[in-house]
Amino acid sequence: MYGYAGRILYVDLNTGKTRVEKLSEDYAKKYIGGIGLGMRLWLDNSKAGVEPFSPENTLVLALGPISGTMFPTAGNGHAFVAKSPETFGIGEAVAHGTFGAEMKRAGYDAVILKGKSEKPVYLWIDDDSVQLVNASHLMGKSPSETEDSIKEDLGDYYIRVVAIGLAGEKLSRIACIINEKTRAAGRTGLGAVMGSKNLKAIAVRGTRDIVPAKPDEFMDMVKEFHERMKGPATQKYRTLGTPENVLVHNALHCMPTRNYNNAHFEGADKVSGEVLNERFVAKIIGCSSCAMRCEHEVVVPEGPYKGTMTRMEYETLWAMGPYCGIDRLDAIIKGMELANYYGMDAIGAGVIVGFAMDCYENGILSQKELGGIEANFGNSEALIQLLEKMGKREGIGDILAEGVRIAGKKIGEGAEKLAQHIKGLEVTGYDLRCLKTAALGFAVSFRGADHNRHGAYAFDVKGKVDRLKAEKGRGKMVRDMENLYALIDSFIVCKFSRGTYYKDMSDMAKLYSLVTGIEMTPEELKKSGERINTIARLINIREGLGRKDDTLPWKVMNMPIPDEGPVKGAVVTQKELDLLLDDYYESRGWTLEGVPTAEKLKEIGMDELLNIVEGKQEA
Amino acid sequence: MVKIHERKFVSADPDKCVGCQNCEYICSWTKEKAFNPLKSRIRVVRINQLANMAVTCRRCEDPPCVAACPRDALTQSEETGTIMVDMDKCNGCGWCIEACDYGAIMLHPETKVVHVCDLCKDEGEPQCVKWCPEEALSVVTSDVLAQKARISAVKKLFQEAKKK
């Protein structure tokens, strides 16, 4: 096989035994790689109703067919898949850097991790030699320290490592898996699944050649995309970066502020991408094979957090800034560094702090319960203190580390309504009350509240539709974007480069064919995108999720936007949500319960999974 | 004999280098028709997120790698300064690797003899320079490097004077 390594590595963490199986061309073509292949392999290697922290919850690491080539941004990604301890449905998260390329050179398309090690270990993959190594000396270390320590122990600077921090070890439901210090497979709590297996890290060294099936045409395409990446399609990411969104969203009143109490932040000018770049950005770096580079490295030059260095993006800046009412960039940067240090999803962590502040201001959590912290909105010291407590699971941090949904339930007294999540996953930086295409995308997203499953906010933010209106037709728009985004995360292409695929499906089909030598048409690829969304849906149905879970956070449906301005009073009603859901399910060929029909499954070649939907199509 | 200041080599500007490894990929592709950093004659080092730099052969005057080779497998071209490897004589002992201060001469993982940058003599120009998306790599002489450093130092001096 070209592009694909053609091999899947199985690791039994109970015994340390490993075996290698062939990747079938059928799976490769149908599910592509990354999250698509990962979810399909997870389904095959798990039982219905598995507990997220049980040894039976298989953790899958999957690469894309393009990984290891020099195709710009597509050569370096990796994806994790398992049942999410936050959503209790399918969990998946993608990261870029250099790890994915190294793993492909080691000769694997996927690694399937089963069982649980008796003692803390890390997995050391040195081409064909695979072993579990004692990791007791790494426990408590940050992902960054773990990476450095493993490189030192193994004596090779070019070994690539993914690792969890203390949050993952302590089964925090927002724990992530970090590579190269600042890059995270962030969402859905998969770091805790890794922790539940006593697996601290995965280290890899790969020495094999990667050769595309059609080398000359492939290099022509690389050259073309190098040029495209210098153009307008990537300009935002190369200059201000995603923090540009702060002022854009704020002007549109679609930036959730103070735990969704507002949609507009009066302190936005102080935390804008412009100020971040002028005062804090020290360098913009790139992943392996990237030709655009986006990673804004910031350093705090003075004050109490002097010397703090981390990567900064809009979402994490928003979560720890406006969402907590905080207008100090130095503290937000410190918060981001702490999230990386403990290995927590920085979006989830920020949203949880905003939630705790809301609880405090509403008298649901007292200063005593918070361990002496005066958690008013806007208190940047409280942000830092609460993050520390969450990372270590100390005091109130132990409850908050359960994720906002479970924390809300445990705290009670109305805290449930202050917990802004979908399917248990914390919200991201788009106010869904005034972005109704996005609201649908978020509601049906298979991994819970997230912008990265569809990018449907773009229609609203760019004014392609009336963003305050819920109407028929949005279902199809969300569906098509979901299919595209599922492919992006399966190839694995960087989402920041999506604009360089001028003719998205045809460009992607061409890339796939040139690398793998497997003929792929845009139509077939579209079908794969549909299939990948369907496999996710089938897993969620098997795990007990359905239409009832395709919903929106409490405040989005019950607390109209109070701010004077263009969207005052905006809210999503149940009637509107129902209209949007019906339209979306219909566009997908699913029943009104959100269950794929037998005809649909047959049409896209998934007949073998009919048993999952049997008897579930009607309410 | 060529004058030393005319001798050319590939140099990376650490302010521009972002650590993307495109130079490694295009090097191994050009030389071996495969993507594999271990087969690249230029390697990227990232000390931390802020410190990135690609490193390759400097074509030293009186090169220590040549002097270190006990089998006379290495010679330096008088014309271009390129380090030439006699593949029959090299037995991969690694003395040249130890002698090079830059880690710029490396053992090939398959042939087990050393390989080193030759400025893509068959292609007419170094492909890493051509493909670097950040324009961080350039072909320079030591004279050009010194000029660049002088100019940037003087610019900085005047900018600081302006601020005052």
Image (cartoon, rainbow, N blue to C red):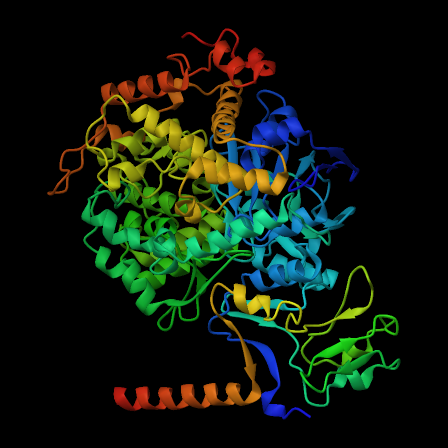
In the picture, which quadrant includes the N terminus of chain A? top right
How many numbered marks does the figure carry?
0
Given residues A377 and B114, the one toward you in this image is B114
Residue at image coords 55%, 56%: A289
As drawn, A225 above or below A414? below
**Within the image, what quadrant is residue B142 found in?**
bottom right
Question: Residue A168 appears at what percent x and percent y?
Answer: 56, 45
Q: Is residue A392 in view from this perspective?
A: no
**Within the image, what quadrant is residue A478 found in?**
top left
**Within the image, what quadrant is residue B122 found in?**
bottom right
Question: Residue A606 appears at what percent x and percent y?
Answer: 56, 18
Given residues A356 and A522, the one toward you in this image is A522
In the picture, which quadrant includes the C terminus of chain A? top left
Question: Residue A340 appears at what percent x and percent y?
Answer: 49, 54
Q: Is residue A284 left or right of residue A56?
A: left
As drawn, A495 above or below A269? above
Residue at image coords 25%, 37%: A460
As drawn, A411 above or below A147? above
Residue at image coords 63%, 22%: A47
Considering every residue shown, the one lying at the far left of the view is: A564
Residue at image coords 47%, 71%: B16
Q: Is residue A248 in view from this perspective?
A: yes
Q: Is residue A465 left or right of residue B133?
A: left
Question: Residue A57 appears at what percent x and percent y?
Answer: 62, 30
